[in-house]
C-alpha cells in the first residue's frame, strides 16, 4: 500500500503524463499540475526539484529498455536533423518531426519535452559528427601540408551542401541565444582550432613552416576565415579558401601543393 507521499508523487506523474499524451510537452507546466492535483507548489517541490526532473520520471515510467530508449532518441534526432537542415526553426513544429520519425506526437514528447530541446540534441549530434569527420581526416595522412588540403575540402563539402550549410548557420545563430548550443559550438571550435594548431606545430617541427610563426594565431585565423566563407560565400569557397592559403604561404611558408 502506498504511503501518502508516494500517492502524491504518483498523482503528479499521472497528471503530467495525461497532459503530455493529450497536449504535448509544451503544455506541461508546474502551475497546472499543482492546480489539477490540488496541492501547493512547495508540496510539488518536495517530490521533484524541477519540471525537468518530472519529465525524466515520465520518460522512465514503464521500465523501458535503455537500449530501446537510446535507439528511439537516435531515430528522432536523425529525423529532426533532416527537418532543421531544410527549414527554419520557426517553420517546424513537433508534428513535422514526429511524422518524419514515423511516430505520433505523444511518443515524441516522451523523449523530448519541446522543440528547443530537440534542436539542441540535433545540433550536438551534428557537432559530434563533425568532430568525428575531422578525426578521420587527421588519421588519413600524417602530412601536415596535405591535411590543410583535406581540411579545405571538408569545409568546401559542407559549404556547398544546402542542408549542412543551413544547419551550420542555425548552429551559429542559436549559439548566441542558447547556453547549451553555445557550449557545444565552443567545444567544436576549440577542438578544430587545436587540431589546426597541432598540425602547424608538427609542420614547424618538420621544417615546413617558419619557426617564428605563431601556430595558435594562424590556426584561429584559418578557422575563422573558413567559417566566414562557409556562411557568406559558399559558392566561391574553393577559390577564396585557396587564395587565403596562398597568402598564408607567404607569411609562414606553407607550400600549397594541389594534389589529385
Image (tube, rainbow, N blue to C red):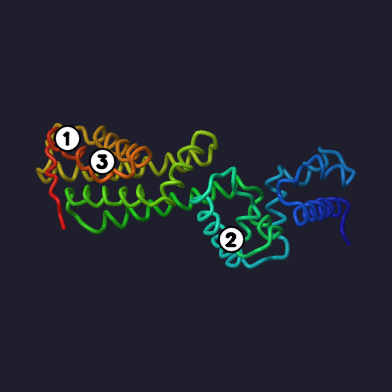
Estimate the x, y position of residue 25 in percent, counting from the top left: 71, 49
Secondary element under disc 3, as helix, strand or loop, is: helix
The earlier-in-sequence mark between 1 and 3 is 3
Identify residue for label 2: 100
Nearer-the-camera pick, 86 or 55? 86
Residue at (42%, 39%) from the top-left corner? Answer: 186
- Label 2 SS: helix
The image shows residue 14 at horizontal and vertical percentages of: 81, 55
N-terminal label among 2 and 1: 2
Residue 127 at x, y percent in the picture? 43, 49
Q: How far apart are labels 3 and 2 at the CA level?
A: 40 Å
Q: Quadrant of the N terminus?
A: bottom right
Give the number of the mark in front: 1 or 3: 1
Q: Nearer the viewer, mark 3 or mark 2?
A: 2
Label 3: how many residues lie within 10 Å, few (<14), some (14-19) or many (20+)? many
Q: Which mark is drawn over residue 247?
A: 1
Viewer-nearest residue: 79 or 2 = 79
Q: Earlier in the sequence, mark 3 or mark 2?
A: 2
Local crowd at mark 2 within 10 Å, few (<14), some, or many (≥20)?
A: some
Q: What residue does disc 3 label?
A: 197
The CA distance from mark 1 to mark 3 is 17 Å
Q: Residue shown at 68%/46% (left/top)?
A: 52
Badges 3 and 2: C-beta atoms under 8 Å apart?
Answer: no
Res 249 → quadrant: top left
Q: Residue at x 60, y 49 (%)?
A: 92
Amino acid at each position: 500500500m502506498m504511503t501518502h507521499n508516494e500517492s502524491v508523487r504518483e498523482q503528479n506523474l499521472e497528471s503530467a503524463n495525461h497532459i503530455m499524451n493529450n497536449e504535448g510537452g509544451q503544455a506541461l507546466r508546474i502551475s497546472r499540475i499543482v492546480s489539477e492535483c490540488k496541492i501547493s507548489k512547495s508540496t510539488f517541490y518536495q517530490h521533484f526539484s524541477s519540471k525537468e526532473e518530472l519529465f525524466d520520471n515520465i520518460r522512465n515510467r514503464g521500465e523501458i529498455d535503455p537500449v530501446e530508449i537510446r535507439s528511439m532518441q537516435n531515430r528522432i534526432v536523425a529525423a529532426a536533423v533532416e527537418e532543421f537542415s531544410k527549414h527554419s526553426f520557426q517553420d517546424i513544429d513537433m508534428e513535422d518531426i514526429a511524422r518524419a520519425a514515423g511516430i505520433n506526437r505523444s511518443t515524441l514528447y516522451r523523449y523530448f519535452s519541446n522543440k528547443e530541446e530537440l534542436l539542441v540534441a540535433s545540433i550536438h549530434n551534428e557537432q559530434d559528427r563533425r568532430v568525428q569527420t575531422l578525426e578521420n581526416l587527421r588519421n588519413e595522412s600524417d602530412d601536415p601540408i596535405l591535411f590543410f588540403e583535406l581540411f579545405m575540402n571538408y569545409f568546401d563539402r559542407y559549404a556547398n551542401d544546402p542542408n549542412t550549410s543551413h544547419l551550420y548557420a542555425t548552429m551559429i545563430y542559436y549559439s548566441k541565444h542558447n547556453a547549451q548550443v553555445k557550449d557545444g559550438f565552443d567545444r567544436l571550435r576549440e577542438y578544430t582550432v587545436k587540431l589546426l594548431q597541432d598540425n602547424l606545430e608538427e609542420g614547424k617541427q618538420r621544417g615546413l613552416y617558419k619557426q617564428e610563426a605563431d601556430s595558435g594565431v594562424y590556426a584561429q585565423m584559418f578557422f575563422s576565415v573558413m567559417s566566414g566563407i562557409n556562411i557568406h560565400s559558399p559558392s566561391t569557397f574553393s577559390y577564396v579558401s585557396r587564395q587565403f592559403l596562398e597568402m598564408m604561404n607567404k607569411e609562414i611558408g606553407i607550400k600549397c601543393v594541389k594534389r589529385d
